Image (cartoon, grey):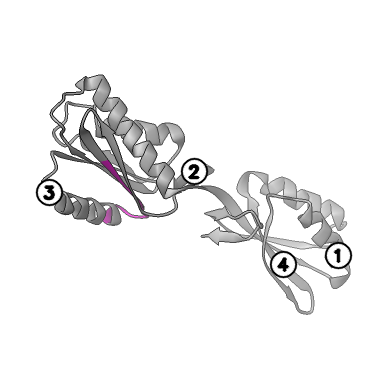
Amino acid sequence: MNQYKSALKYSKTEYIVEKSKFIAHVKPIATEEEAIVFIEGIKKEHRKANHNVPVYSIKDKVQKYSDDGEPSKTAGFPVLEMLKKENITNVAIVVTRYFGGIKLGKGGLIRAYTKSAKLGLETSEMIEYIEVTKVALIYEHTLHGKIENFILKKSDVHEINTEFLENVRKEVYVPSEKAENFEKSLIELTNSMIIIEEIDSEFVAFSDDKKCTYP
């Protein structure tokens, strides 16, 4: 996985189906512990609800759900499947249901829980995280203009920091899948008069002005 989507902020969204009230609570998380604390808090807040259906996904680690008393695979399961399909992770969702007296049937439950979760995600705002490699470039001052122009033309390369010491040291984020070609191009551009160091890789999100906004 070299990219994924997640929620930007907590949200609470209500959705009515055949007099049943569905309330989607969505929260970005990084650990299973965060997910459990969040879910328990919602269950306590809505302890009089008929169902509190929890779902959470943590990138490359764990994906869990419960139907919380609804018929098997009609509540938490379809929500988790939706998250997988949409490549959404690092998020916890609890869909609370207050029964309105009209049974929805298995198909109706699946549609209602999935729709409620989707509305909650939309309200929480989705942001895309991309796997990037942090690269340090070290070169002589005379090459700075040429390298700067080269990087400015790369919309998916994001500058982090530039230091003007004995040589110039510039740190950038490069999409990991493009790092090798980026480095080869710089070597050719400078006739090998550049030192390139790959520092580490991580998932980050960027705003439109090319600055890193979410580490």
Amino acid tagged 4: Lys
Task: Provide the residue designation for mark 3.
Answer: 47
Task: Provide the residue designation for mark 4.
Answer: 170
Q: Nearer the viewer, residue 65 or 170?
A: 65
Amino acid tagged 1: Gly
Task: Check disc 1 and report its element: helix, strand or loop.
Answer: helix
Mark 4 in CB contact with mark 2 (< 8 angstroms): no
Label 1 neighbour load within 10 Å: few <14, some 14-19, many 20+: few
**Residue 128 falls left or right of residue 153:** left
Q: Which mark is residue 4?
A: 2
Residue 170: image location, x then y, percent: 72, 67
Q: Is residue 32 magenta?
A: yes
Task: Provide the residue designation for mark 1.
Answer: 145
Asked whether residue 80 appears in the rendered view, the answer is: no
Q: Which residues are magenta?
A: 23-33
Residue 36: image location, x then y, percent: 23, 52
Residue 96: image location, x then y, percent: 22, 42
Mark pair 3, 2: CA separation: 33 Å
Task: Check disc 3 and report its element: helix, strand or loop.
Answer: loop
**Which label's residue is closer to the chain start, 4 or 3?**
3
Mark 4 in CB contact with mark 3 (< 8 angstroms): no
**Which label's residue is closer to the chain start, 3 or 2?**
2
Q: Nearer the viewer, residue 203 or 54?
A: 54
**Residue 116 falls left or right of residue 87:** left
Q: Residue at x 55, y 60 (%)?
A: 213
Mark 2 in CB contact with mark 1 (< 8 angstroms): no
Asked if 45 appears above or below 194 in the picture, the reply is: above
Task: Check disc 4 and report its element: helix, strand or loop.
Answer: strand
